[in-house]
Image (cartoon, rainbow, N blue to C red):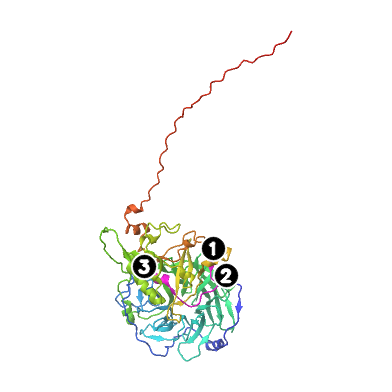
């Protein structure tokens, strides 16, 4: 696939300062930032235990109560994982270090990035009520605040010498732009690298110091662009593929290659591709499935691999071979970094690493009279509007926890007004939903009016032949204190009425990313056990079959087993239609039978003499 480079001018003139400032960029020791270190955080409320399956030789287990030394010279992964309603930072090595929690408080910490010297970890945090950048000292555990603005600041990327950080910031509540900030001199002028009406995000600083790759939809859809710091005003589109949606660029350690994730909107397949900067016109190469790539060295790449309701960590060689078998992670991932460090980890992080409280998903019990012990009852949902505001008692507590957390993070009671909760067997659902989970009392559907009122948006995600939807809720507070900006194009079902092509496809992606701050409800619901369902195979021509608003609390059960928790087996027996036999017909006697015909003599003419 050849690359036709497109250029766009408009690079801020102050970027000329970079030509001198980074003339000697190289991998040197990171200067210790100036400022006051905040005390190491300690858990303020119980958080769930990290319990994962064992896979040999790649093992993830619950954090140990002993001090673990980080491997050296091997590197460490730094991850932001969802647990207990929030994102927390973890460190991990597939072969030597169990998944070790670094932060555990009641706020989100996302997009970690390890500094060049391995002593500082940059990340974005909501601990102050707004999204700002912070630096975590891996030696002593202190935290230094880097930005202090109401805007969303995230996705930090270090310069090779560790003196600067490039990051994304949500400007005037309309779009993401990329900025460069000094780490060692807080008073230095902030550099606005991009100034475009489009969304510019996910910066990745080249190890050579002269380029910054990022994602921008300035060409009409997300592409990988490069800001060349040696040529002021030039932005180069290096992916240039209108058939794919790109994300998360990452440079190889030697700066010769650039990896990114790309999703084919037709097939839904997401994979890692590698572009050779030394031969820019050559076709990109496929490395493996997944997204959010990070380089371990010049020959190995790790990535996130998603399934409809789970997240895995995997790794590939640059030639396309498997280097790390998929390892199940305990929650959704919002940031992945890798680098070499010889720091002794838990040390100051011991308190966070040993958080071992119960999971927030607490099954309820509500014994009722006249109900066999093998079955459960229904509980009524308080202050919930639905035709039948009830759920299976084993799902009731989890629903209430999810409702409370959604209300706190979105700013409005999303689950207080539902389209459906429990549905009795006597109520027929839409065609094709005869075995829907709503009958089990373990599912609910959000009010579809929300998507029409622009209070809810859904992003299409395809896995193989199945289509799923990621739900985002518009937050009530739009000042940066709730939610995050969208980086993906939501699906527009209403486009079916305006285009014949969109009608056949069940809609189309929106033309632009909606502005504002949004809450990823799909990720939040998964932390409380609520999973999404695939759309029916005919959803493109059948709106109700999309099932974009339904969430299920299955607990690993199949539909029939879940039904047997409420009903006796006889209810599930479908009676076989028996056609009654018909009587064998008998001969009916004729009331009249015609006589057998006989030959009639024929008169012959005679001659007259």
- Label 3 CA crowd tier, 10 Å (few <14, some 14–19, many 20+): many
Dot label at residue 242: 2
Range drawn in magenta: 505-528
Residue 207: x %, y % from top left: 50, 80
* Distance between mark 2 and mark 1 Cα atoms: 18 Å
Ranked by sequence position, the earlier of labels 2 and 1 is 2
Q: Quadrant of the N terminus?
A: bottom right
Residue 510: x %, y % from top left: 53, 71
* Distance between mark 2 and mark 3 Cα atoms: 37 Å
Residue with the mark numbered 3: 529
Would you say 85 lies left or right of 255 here? left
Vertical placement of residue 598 versus 161, above or below: above
Residue 524 forms part of the magenta stretch: yes
Q: Is residue 596 visible?
A: yes
Nearer the viewer's eye, disc 2 or disc 1? 1
Vertical placement of residue 513 versus 164, above or below: above
Residue with the mark numbered 1: 505
Q: Secondary structure at mark 3?
A: loop
* Distance between mark 3 and mark 1 Cα atoms: 31 Å
Q: Are marks 3 and 1 in contact (CB under 8 Å)?
A: no
Q: Quadrant of the C terminus?
A: top right
């Amino acid at each position: 696939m050849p690359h036709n480079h497109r250029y766009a001018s408009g690079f801020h003139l102050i970027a000329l300062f970079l030509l001198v400032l980074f003339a000697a960029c190289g991998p040197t020791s990171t200067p210790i930032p100036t400022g006051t270190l905040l005390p190491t955080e300690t858990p303020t409320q119980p958080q769930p235990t990290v319990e994962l399956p064992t896979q040999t030789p790649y093992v993830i287990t619950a954090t140990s109560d002993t001090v673990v030394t980080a491997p050296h010279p091997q590197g460490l992964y730094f991850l932001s994982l969802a647990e207990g309603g929030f994102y927390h930072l973890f460190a991990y090595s597939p072969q030597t270090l169990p998944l070790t929690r670094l932060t555990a408080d009641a706020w989100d910490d996302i997009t970690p990035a390890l500094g060049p010297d391995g002593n500082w970890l940059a990340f974005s945090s909501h601990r102050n009520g707004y999204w700002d950048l912070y630096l975590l000292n891996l030696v002593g555990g202190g935290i230094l605040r880097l930005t202090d603005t109401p805007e969303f600041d995230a996705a930090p990327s270090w310069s090779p010498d560790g003196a600067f950080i490039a990051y994304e910031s949500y400007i005037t509540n309309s779009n993401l732009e990329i900025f460069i900030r000094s780490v060692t001199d807080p008073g230095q002028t902030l550099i606005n690298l991009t100034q475009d009406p489009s969304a510019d995000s996910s910066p990745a600083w080249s190890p050579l110091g002269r380029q910054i790759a990022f994602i921008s939809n300035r060409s009409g859809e997300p592409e990988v662009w490069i800001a060349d710091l040696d040529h002021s005003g030039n932005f180069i589109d290096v992916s240039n593929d209108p058939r794919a949606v790109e994300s998360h660029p990452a440079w190889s350690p030697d700066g010769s290659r650039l990896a990114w994730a790309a999703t084919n909107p037709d097939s839904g397949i997401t994979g890692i591709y590698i572009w050779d900067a030394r031969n820019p016109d050559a076709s990109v190469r496929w490395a493996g499935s997944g997204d959010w790539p990070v380089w371990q060295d010049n020959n190995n790449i790790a990535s996130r691999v998603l399934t409809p309701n789970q997240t895995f960590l995997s790794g590939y060689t640059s030639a396309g071979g498997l280097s790390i078998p998929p390892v199940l992670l305990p929650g959704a991932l919002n940031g992945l970094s890798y680098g070499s460090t010889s720091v002794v980890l838990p040390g100051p992080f011991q308190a966070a690493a040993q958080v071992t409280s119960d999971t927030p998903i607490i099954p309820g019990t509500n014994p009722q009279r006249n109900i066999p012990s093998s079955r459960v009852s229904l509980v009524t949902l308080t202050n919930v509007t639905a035709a039948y505001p009830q759920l299976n008692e084993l799902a009731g507590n989890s629903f209430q926890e999810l409702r409370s957390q959604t209300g706190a993070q979105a700013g409005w009671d999303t689950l207080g007004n539902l389209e459906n909760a429990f549905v009795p067997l006597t109520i027929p659902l839409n065609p094709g939903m005869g075995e829907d989970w709503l009958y089990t009392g373990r599912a609910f559907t959000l009010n579809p009016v929300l998507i029409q009122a622009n209070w809810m948006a859904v992003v299409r995600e395809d896995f193989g032949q199945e289509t799923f939807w990621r739900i985002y809720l518009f937050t009530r507070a739009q000042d940066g204190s709730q939610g995050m900006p969208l980086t993906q194009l939501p699906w527009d079902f209403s486009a079916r009425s305006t285009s014949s092509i969109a009608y056949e496809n069940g809609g189309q992606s929106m033309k632009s990313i909606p502005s504002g701050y949004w809450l990823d409800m799909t990720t939040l619901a998964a932390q409380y056990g609520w999973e999404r369902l695939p759309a029916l195979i005919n959803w493109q021509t059948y709106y109700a079959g999309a099932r974009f608003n339904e969430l299920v609390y299955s607990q690993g059960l199949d539909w029939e087993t879940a039904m047997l928790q409420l009903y006796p087996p006889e209810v599930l027996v479908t009676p076989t239609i028996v056609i009654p036999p018909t009587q064998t017909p008998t001969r009916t006697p004729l009331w009249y039978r015609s006589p057998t015909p006989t030959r009639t003599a024929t008169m012959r003419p005679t001659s007259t003499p």
